[in-house]
Amino acid sequence: MVRAELAWSAGPGVPDIDASALLLTSVGRVRDDGDFVFYNQPRHTSGAVRHLGKRHADGAATDTVEVDLRSVEPAVERIVLGASADGGTFGQAPGLVLRLLDAGSGIELARFDMAAGSETAFIGGELYRRQGAWKFRAVGQGYASGLAGLATDFGITVDDPAQTPLVAAPLPPPPPAPAPRPSGSTRFTKGEEQLPVDMRKRLSLRKEQVAVSLRKHGAAEVTARVILVLDASGSMSFLYSKGVVADVVERMAAVAAQLDDDGEMQAWTFASNPARLPDLRLGELPEWLRLHVRVGEISLFRRKRKKGLDPSQVDMRDVGIQNEEQKVIAEVRAYVREHPTSAPTLVLFFSDGGVYRNAEIEAQLREAVEEPVFWQFVGLGRANYGVLERFDTLPGRRVDNVGFFSVDDISTVPDAELYDRLLSEFPQWIRAARGAGIL
């Protein structure tokens, strides 16, 4: 097992650098996008290649890719060791070096001191098979077109190079007026440029995954209003305190950014009672997470109201701790009726179970069949989802307006899989709802 360690001197004016690996066949191409290992897809499905992430110490920074050469699939002939610079060029990164290390002993097997200029993506070296053995060679090829240029050379799908999520350079400002987007491309949303670098990277890559899922299900051109609903019942406290819910919200922001023309999400939280949260605008995502993903802080459930709440915040004492899904469903339905739009509405509803108002929930969702809304429920690991789990099989509806799936630990579900499951039934409902005259 070997580690390819990219090292440089960090400091003011030095761009953020990310290591990556591409697994290539004998024709010099990836088999699919899964053969690209990087910070947002850190483990190859074979387990042979992993992105280990960054380390900082005493002004030095490293980012590392680990390769288990014995586990590399026979179809893979070369592993390209690449990198991208975000917020600048490689010429602004002093002391840039690629080291190949024995993962067990830490012994340096090879070293390549890289000289660079205006490049924003770089191939430092590659591992390749020769007569049944693995060899290493330095390459030193740069790309001024960023990681998108590198990736497309090896067969990675990039629908819109000008706005691709693989480009490591800062994203451009939004155009003055929206233009028709190419089929299946990612959409640039106002506010993206305001996000922190790491969050902007995650958002861009996740939007691409959303676009891939929509294309896969024949809905590349679909736009929709996206509404988020978050369970705040007492049993959810652990998921909030561990940051799981905040991560879910960030991942759902990518769905809204790709599906919704303005990239905003309306949002509710609920337990004993529903409460409308402020609209989530993309450029305000870090602050929104800080202010409004608050459940699980024990102080919010004390008898006395917590002092110093921002005027926009919901006092969770008013929301309570029980499960009353039917109330928030009714409130979201009322909002959709009072704020009609030409686009359908996708409700992303997260709960950890404990459903017991089955008759009331069923009544609400049956009434909602004739409304331009698809309800996608996601179970977060507990049990007893009641009628939500059974709704797909309930007869007597013109169209199936409800989807449901549950996961044991959503934080371990890769983005590609999560968005596939999240968006698989929504396009089917759109086609059925159009045929029934609901849309």
Image (tube, rainbow, N blue to C red):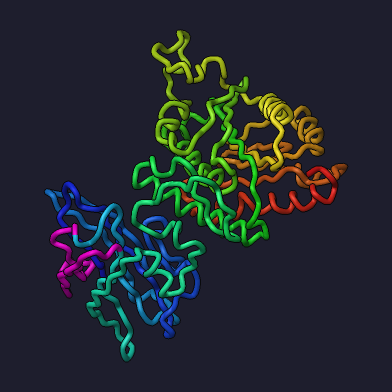
Which residues are drawn in magenta? 92-120
Percent x, y for residue 184? 58, 59
Percent x, y for residue 132? 33, 88
Percent x, y for residue 141? 27, 74
Percent x, y for residue 194? 38, 40
**Residue pushed farthest bottom?**
131
Q: Is residue 181 left or right of residue 402?
A: left
Quarter of the N terminus within the rendering: bottom left
Residue nearer the viewer, 179 or 259: 179
Q: Is residue 132 left or right of residue 92?
A: right
**Is residue 111 in the magenta section?**
yes
Q: Is residue 410 left or right of residue 271?
A: left
Quarter of the C terminus within the rendering: top right
Residue 93, compared with residue 368, is above or below; it is below
Q: Residue at x 15, y 55 (%)?
A: 9
**Residue pushed farthest right?**
396
Q: Residue at x 59, y 43 (%)?
A: 260
Residue 187, compared with residue 83, is above or below; it is above
**Is residue 409 in the magenta section?**
no
**Residue pushed farthest front?**
176
Q: Residue at x 33, y 75 (%)?
A: 69
How many dots with numbers? 0
Q: Is residue 172 left or right of residue 135?
A: right
Residue 1 visible in this rendered orientation of the protein: no
Quarter where residue 378 is shown: top right
